[in-house]
Image (cartoon, rainbow, N blue to C red):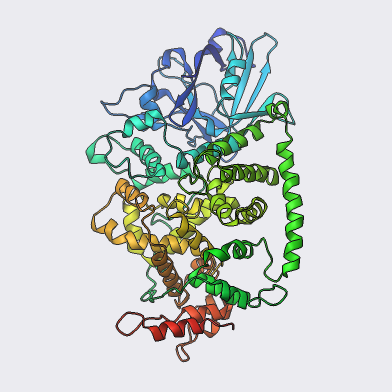
Amino acid sequence: VVYEQEGVFIHSSCGKNDDQDSLIAGILRVIEKENEVVVDWRPLDETLDTSNILCAGKDSSSVVEWTQTPKEKCSRGADRPSSYEAEWDMVTTVSFKKKPHSNGDATTHANGESKWSFLFSLTDLKSIKQNKEGMGWSYLVFCLKDDVKLPALHFHHGDSKPLIKCLENHVALNESPHDERVLLVKTQKSLSQSFENLFDEPSYGLLQKWKKDPYIVTMGKFSKVTNYIVGSLRSSDPSNQRRPPSEMADFFNDTIPGLKINQQEEPGFEVITRIDLGKQPEVSRREPVSAEEWAKNMDSEGRILDVDYIKRLIFKGGLCHTLRKEAWKFLLGYFPWNSTKEERANLQKRKTDEYFRMKLQWKSVSEEQEKRNSRLRDYRSLIEKDVNRTDRTNKFYEGEDNPGLILLHDILMTYCMYDFDLGYVQGMSDLLSPVLYVMENEVDAFWCFVSYMDQMHQNFEEQMQGMKTQLIQLSHLLRLLDSGFCSYLESQDSGYLYFCFRWLLIRFKREFSFQDILRLWEVMWTELPCQNFHLLLCCAILESEKQQIMDKHYGFNEILKHINELSMKIDVEYILCKAEAISMQMMNCKELPQTVSEILGIENSSVTPDSDTGEDESAAELSCPASLYQSISTPVVAANGTRDDAQQTAETQSLTPA
């Protein structure tokens, strides 16, 4: 308990009379628990009665009402104490239940005691309205997201300033430009705190709960946190170790609001799952693109002669490391593909000036100015915290006072000036680190990072729309690929594919070794052989692990643990081959569902290969070039299932400009 104040009243008949009976005296507390902070108010005689927690209810007309939470929802079992400790294990946010409109006074029990208790997480707080009444005491109103307003709290003993000061330790509060009485919660800080659950070591209390777990050393941070949260939702009764899918759906929908993934309920969805994709073709990869190959495809003025050809080579083999510094600028869009060497030099000069102007903006902020700029303080604090733990085992970033760390810090701070609305969110340092490592130049790394963030921006926005969309799309693809596996995951409350969250958020950065990530990212940046190839990489990894998960009858926790233990153990070349094979499998499907066609950027009319010629004449309608599809659609495999030198040579020779 970091704040506690008695004499905080709710005026249940405020505006009608000043009778003492219309005032409900209570205690207001701010409770810090693990990685969350909650605000709790309840009448004096109910501070330990969890059955009296009230739920804010909204109907279609946005009328806010109050009703008791059903006691069965708060049931703990005989071994669970009815206290803040037990209560917090079950409740992290105010829950919303629909209720018919009534005249809206306090709900009461038969004994006449008012039941107005409420509890909410600071992550749900939108704003605070405060004022002074004529009688001298202060009051404030908490407004939650979706404009749900809680009853006004009147401070008869003291004022609300200590509470506001306490809350400012956990959320950023700024005065509304439209009403000086309203303090707005800056959501960026809350969002960053939510990402801490993915990247931070849990707090001491959480570690205590895990100290006897034999797998704690091998499980990733995301696994620890998620497993603990979900574990807190499970009953200690062995007969009830798995929650009903509907309850798990509620939990994950609260975690990522708006996430709607099919749980075998969508009418007609099973029709899609019965499509026969046929056997996955065998594919192979080539050697990385060499400096000689790169130079041969450039004219005397430095223009790339055949962009599609170069992209195909990169997709099939990646780049040798000496080429990355130059080629990544093209792949990320910093350099236009049709530019000359002179045009690129002029572009770099302009971009250098632009970068240092933005860098000067935050460099020139004085300490006094920064005291009045809470967002900049928050950004700086998060960046300093993350930079000190990003890829510290890599020689480029290891040791104290490493110049690589200084550049990492400065680029991220400058990005806050470039996109102040987004600013910095945890996870972004993971995306910058490999780019800076390759570029070894502050300005070039910044502009390449800007281009990368243009692709990844939605992953880090407050509403997390990018994450929602990708998880839904991945669900569609996996169900088409293997409906049986999807059904199994759903039977284990894992149909939401939440264990792929980290993969998607930072593009597998923590799943592969550093050098493998360089290869994986440059392949993905070619945008071949279709849209959203990274989702097919997810499918490839999951399909590779399907047999073990199903044969060993893994449940919810075992699936989560197993997927997290894959980190740094995945063969990047194998997964790239498998993902490419899946893409070919889907492109060759004659009855590809419209939803999947849209996800992969494939025109429905183009997915039927020409069986007479052996060539896909309609592949030109695909989002990738026809010549690419032709070059990858024929497996390079010998009759005995192995590649021979002649075929490998033929494959290399087939990769010629269209």
Residue at 69 percent across and 66 percent down: it is 336
Query: Is residue 648 shown above or below 202?
Result: below
**Residue 128: x %, y % from top left:** 62, 26
Q: Is 117 on the left or on the right of 184, as rendered?
A: left
Q: Where on the picture, by quarter, is residue 293? A: bottom right
Q: Where on the picture, by quarter, is residue 63? A: top right
Q: Is 521 on the left or on the right of 175, as rendered?
A: left
- Total numbered labels: 0
The one of 527 and 95 positioned closer to us in this rendering: 527
Query: Is residue 411 shown above or below 54?
Result: below
The one of 109 and 253 positioned closer to us in this rendering: 253
Quadrant where the C terminus sits is: bottom right
The one of 134 and 178 positioned closer to us in this rendering: 178
Residue 125 appears in the picture as rendered: yes
**Residue 397: x %, y % from top left:** 52, 46
Residue at 70 percent across and 23 percent down: it is 181
**Residue 502: x %, y % from top left:** 46, 49
The one of 408 and 572 positioned closer to us in this rendering: 408
Residue that extends furthest to the bottom in the rendered view of this protein: 612
Residue 624 appears in the picture as rendered: no
**Residue 8: x %, y % from top left:** 55, 14
